Every structure is written in structure tokens, then in C-alpha cells.
Amino acid sequence: MKYSRRFVKLFLAMPVFAFGAALSIQSGIGVNAWDTFALGVANVLPLKYGTVVLLTGVFVLVIDLVMKQSIGIGTLADIFIIGKTTDLILALDIIPQIESLPIAIVCLVTSLFIQSFGVYLYSSAGLSVGPRDAMMIALAKKLNHLSIGMIKGIIEGTVFVIGFLLGAPVGIGTIISVFGIGFILEFTLKLFHFDLRNVPQENIMQTSSHLYNLTKQKVAHETL
């Protein structure tokens, strides 16, 4: 796949993720598993929610490095772009706050499909993925007998249980997210006949080196 197409897929995934996250937030029926974990930790430690989110991200990133997962452009895009883009979508008031419970549930489930499509987009670009998805892929490679969806469900379920036991508030949306995301991700990947385990993910140095060589070859060709 050409680098131009890979970068298009990667950066198209960012607003897709952000829109899915914003839709989930506007459903107003419960936070996701990782936010439940962060709220639970903040409930028992003298740390603010934002600090816990940051420390959790760093901790997961360390786990990725230990498990020899690539840290690439996709990782940085996940960390620095998705959150800000979500904030922008919310600030523009593109998605109204949902008041009806049935509609909120439909919106939440839709958001899980949208975010799963985002996982497909940026992971298929092969430019590395976000810290949490990198951990999921690492575990999936080691536990090859388990499906990607099951691995995702185990991770989400684990952090949810910890957050719940630490006193985090839980809504119906949280339960739907925890038990639904694994199945929805698995369905989405099968729809595109895509296996996360089989796609090499480039780190920053590899991508930089390849782009440098391509630029060098293009300059040499134009000189001739």
C-alpha cells in the first residue's frame, strides 16, 4: 500500500474515532470501561481524574514497550489528536444531548460500531496504533487461540471491574459498552476480512526511514 493511502486511512480514522466518542458521551447513559477505571482510582487516591487518565496512558505505553509493540505515528495521532477532535465536535454542538433512553442506547451502540470501524482504519494503515489497541494486539498475538473480540472484552471487563470495585459510578451505557465492544469489534473486523495480528505496525524510525528513502529516490529520478 502506498504511503499516501496509508496516511489517508490513518488520519481519516481520527475524526471517525472522535465522532464515535462524542456520540457516546452525548448518549449520557454511562462512561466507558477505561473512564470507569479512572474515576474509580480517583475516588480512592488523592489524584484528579485527568491525572489518572494521563498516568494510565503512560502505564499502558510502558506495557506496550515491554511487549515489544511499535510506537509510531499512529500512536502519537491517537494520543494527541482524537481527544482534541472530540472536544471540537462537542464544542460545535454537532450532536445534541440525547434525552430519550431508547434513542440513547441506539446512539451508544452506533458509537461502538463507529469506533470499531476507526480501529480497522488506522490499524490497517500499518503506522502503529494507540496504546490500548497496541496492548490488545500484543495479547492477541500471545493468546492466538482467542479471538480479537474476546481479548478486547477481557481487557475492557478487567478495567471496568477494578473501577467499579473502587467506587466509580456505573450506568447502563457502561454495561453495554463493556459487554458489547468485543462482539462489535470482532464483527467489524470480520466484515472487512481483517486480522489485526497479521499487519506489521511500523515504528516512527521505520516510517521516517522509508519516507526519506522514497523522497531520495524521487529526487534522484527527477534529476535524471
Image (cartoon, grey):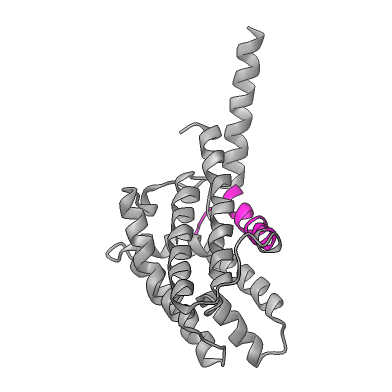
Residue 184, visible in the rendered structure: yes
Which is more toward the observer, 105 or 120?
A: 105
Q: Does residue 142 appear left or right of residue 11 in this picture?
A: left
| Residue 83 pos. (x, y %) | 65, 62
Q: Quadrant of the N terminus?
A: top left
Residue 194 forms part of the magenta stretch: no
The x, y position of residue 112, in whole percent, is 45, 65
Q: Position of residue 124 (x, y in %)?
A: 44, 46
Residue at the limit of the structure toward the front, as seen here: 100
The residue shown at (63%, 14%) is: 220
Foreground residue, 190 or 147? 190
Q: Residue at x 33, y 66 (%)?
A: 143
Any part of residue 71 in sight: no
Name the residue: 47% across, 70% down.
Answer: 108
Instruction: Left or right? Give the position of 29 relative to 212.
Output: left
Q: How many marks?
A: 0
Q: Is residue 53 above or below residue 68?
A: below
Q: Magenta: predominant secondary structure element?
A: helix
- Asked which quadrant contains residue 81, the reply is bottom right
Q: Is residue 212 above or below residue 81?
A: above
Q: Quadrant of residue 151?
A: bottom left
Query: Farthest left residue?
Result: 145
Which quadrant does the C terminus fall into?
top right
Task: Decide if residue 36 is on the left or right side of residue 110.
Answer: right
Q: In the rendered view, would you say 25 is above or below 117?
A: below
Identify the magenta region: 65-88
Query: In front here: 109 or 75?
Result: 109
What residue is drawn where x is 60% and y is 13%? 221
